[in-house]
């Protein structure tokens, strides 16, 4: 498949040809090879810890609103502050990983994040809770970009999409287990005990991650000089394909952040009036995301990158529209489709960033993660505001607009690829 067929730049095509001509003795990890299983499990657990901590308050927002006497929009800042902190700090943390190593930065990030996670249950007020969550998000910023860069350096190109898909699958398991656990624990002992339990689970994941992750063998330290970082960022932002991928990640996460920030309010109110434990169990649909993310590589192999993105966007939109039904089974089916579409789209876009960037991979991934979590913060706040103003249809409207943005950007990539192909054929 040519670069034009996938929407990749000619630089990627050159990189691919270099990889194709590489010697058979390539020492990078590959499925079934030494260290691959340990690496996969380690990053899977890192993904679990990251999403469990990052969204630990999301399923508990109705309880936080009631306990602290605040609105849904105010309570949503406990989610938006964490994702916003991650979005702001992911680029500086990626620069540190270029200098001090991916494993070192990921380990330090998890250590700080789990420590803050053990303090969150003792927050005396909403402002204090929001501040702790912002610090926690900033600490977690060292995980996503560093993990993607680690995989791009240590795993063979053919296995990259699958490896990143497994990391994203860890995200989905963390998001699911965090919400399910907090839902049932909070129903019995309150939201503070619930987030404390998540903190303990994250500690266990962090320890296992550090013990399992193989030492990097292909990392070359970079420079911390600001002008080098600025130049690298400018070069990435000048790449049209990378810009499209960043926007796609942000828009997909806008949908996901809005839906899962608000769904707890919808399901605890009439006509459903579900108890908190049942609402937490709704997040078992994240298992669908685990499957769709881990199979993203095969999806791209069959449909191409843009075809996979069209399918992911269409699935997400169908789920949004289906969730408008006043029937609980149909709402659940809608959440299944939204989750499957989101995680597939995210895995495809994030792995494409790792393949497209031929240098400064941590910065390229950091820019994607920054856009991605800006989308999460925007989705959380705008989705909650729309819900307060127009109910669930308002939140769905925000999501549909975001999906239309994904489709529009993907169409632009298709047209750009056709334009590039014409001169080549002349």
Image: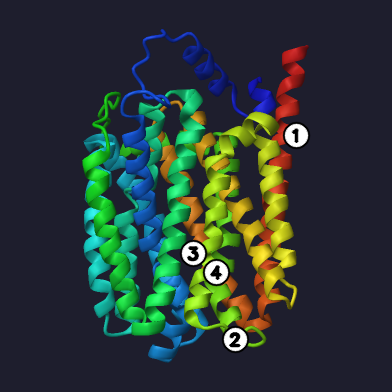
- Say which of 141 and 194 sits in front: 194
Q: Nearer the viewer, mark 2 or mark 1?
A: 2
Distance, label 3 to label 2, CA atoms, is: 27 Å
Closer to the chain start, of discs 3 and 1, is: 3
Taking the image as shown, residue 13 lies to the left or right of residue 147, namely: right
Q: Nearer the viewer, mark 4 or mark 3?
A: 4
Query: Where residue 192 sits in the image (x, y, percent)?
Result: 31, 79
Closer to the chain start, of discs 1 and 4, is: 4
Q: Which mark is residue 273?
A: 2
Vertical placement of 54 versus 40: above or below?
below
Distance, label 4 to label 2, CA atoms, is: 13 Å
Q: Which mark is residue 377?
A: 3
- Say which of 203 and 115 sits in front: 203
Taking the image as shown, residue 408 lies to the left or right of residue 14, namely: right
Taking the image as shown, residue 12 lies to the left or right of residue 25, namely: right
Location of residue 131 by image quarter? bottom left
Q: Tell me which residue sits at (51%, 80%) in the image.
A: 73
Residue on which disc 1 sits: 415
Taking the image as shown, residue 196 lies to the left or right of residue 280, namely: left
Distance, label 2 to label 1, CA atoms, is: 48 Å
Q: Which mark is residue 237?
A: none
Query: Where residue 5 sits in the image (x, y, percent)?
Result: 69, 25
Vertical placement of 363 versus 157: above or below?
below
Q: Which mark is residue 282?
A: 4
The crowd level at tag 2 (other Cα within 10 Å; few <14, some 14-19, many 20+) is few
Q: How many marks?
A: 4
The crowd level at tag 3 (other Cα within 10 Å; few <14, some 14-19, many 20+) is many
Query: Where residue 236 sits in the image (x, y, percent)?
Result: 48, 36
Closer to the chain start, of discs 2 and 1, is: 2
């Amino acid at each position: 498949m040519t670069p034009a067929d996938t929407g990749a730049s000619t630089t990627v095509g050159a990189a691919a040809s270099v990889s194709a001509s590489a010697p058979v003795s390539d020492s990078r990890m590959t499925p079934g090879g030494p260290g691959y299983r340990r690496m996969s499990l380690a990053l899977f657990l890192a993904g679990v810890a990251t999403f469990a901590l990052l969204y630990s308050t999301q399923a508990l927002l109705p309880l936080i609103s009631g306990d602290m006497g605040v609105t849904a929009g105010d309570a949503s800042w406990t989610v938006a502050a964490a994702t916003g902190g991650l979005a702001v700090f992911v680029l500086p943390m990626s620069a540190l990983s270029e200098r001090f190593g991916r494993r070192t930065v990921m380990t330090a990030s998890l250590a700080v994040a789990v420590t803050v996670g053990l303090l969150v249950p003792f927050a005396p007020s909403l402002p204090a809770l929001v501040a702790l969550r912002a610090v926690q998000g900033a600490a977690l910023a060292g995980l996503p970009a560093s993990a993607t860069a680690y995989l791009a350096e240590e795993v063979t190109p053919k296995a990259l999409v699958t490896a990143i898909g497994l990391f994203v699958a860890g995200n989905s398991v963390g998001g699911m287990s965090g919400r399910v656990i907090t839902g049932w624990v909070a129903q019995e002992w309150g939201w503070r005990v619930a987030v404390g339990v998540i903190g303990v689970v994250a500690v266990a994941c962090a320890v296992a991650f550090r013990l399992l992750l193989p030492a990097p063998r292909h990392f070359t330290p970079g420079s911390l000089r600001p002008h080098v970082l600025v130049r690298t960022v400018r070069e990435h932002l000048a790449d049209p394909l990378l810009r499209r991928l960043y926007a796609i990640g942000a828009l997909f996460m806008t949908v996901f952040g809005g839906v899962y920030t608000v769904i707890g309010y919808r399901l605890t109110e009439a006509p459903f009036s579900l108890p908190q434990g049942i609402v937490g169990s709704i997040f078992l649909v994240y298992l669908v995301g685990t499957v769709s993310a881990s199979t993203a590589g095969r999806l791209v192999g069959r449909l191409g990158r843009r075809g996979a993105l069209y399918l992911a966007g269409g699935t997400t939109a169908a789920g949004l529209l289906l969730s408008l039904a006043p029937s609980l089974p149909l709402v659940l089916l809608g959440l299944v489709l939204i989750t499957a579409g989101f995680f597939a789209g995210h895995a495809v876009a994030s792995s494409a960033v790792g393949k497209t960037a031929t240098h400064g991979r941590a910065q390229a991934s950091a820019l994607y993660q920054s856009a991605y979590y800006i989308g999460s913060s925007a989705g959380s706040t705008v989705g909650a505001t729309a819900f307060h103003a127009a109910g669930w249809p308002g939140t769905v409207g925000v999501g549909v607009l975001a999906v239309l943005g994904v489709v529009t950007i993907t169409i632009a990539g298709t047209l750009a690829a056709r334009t590039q192909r014409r001169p080549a054929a002349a």
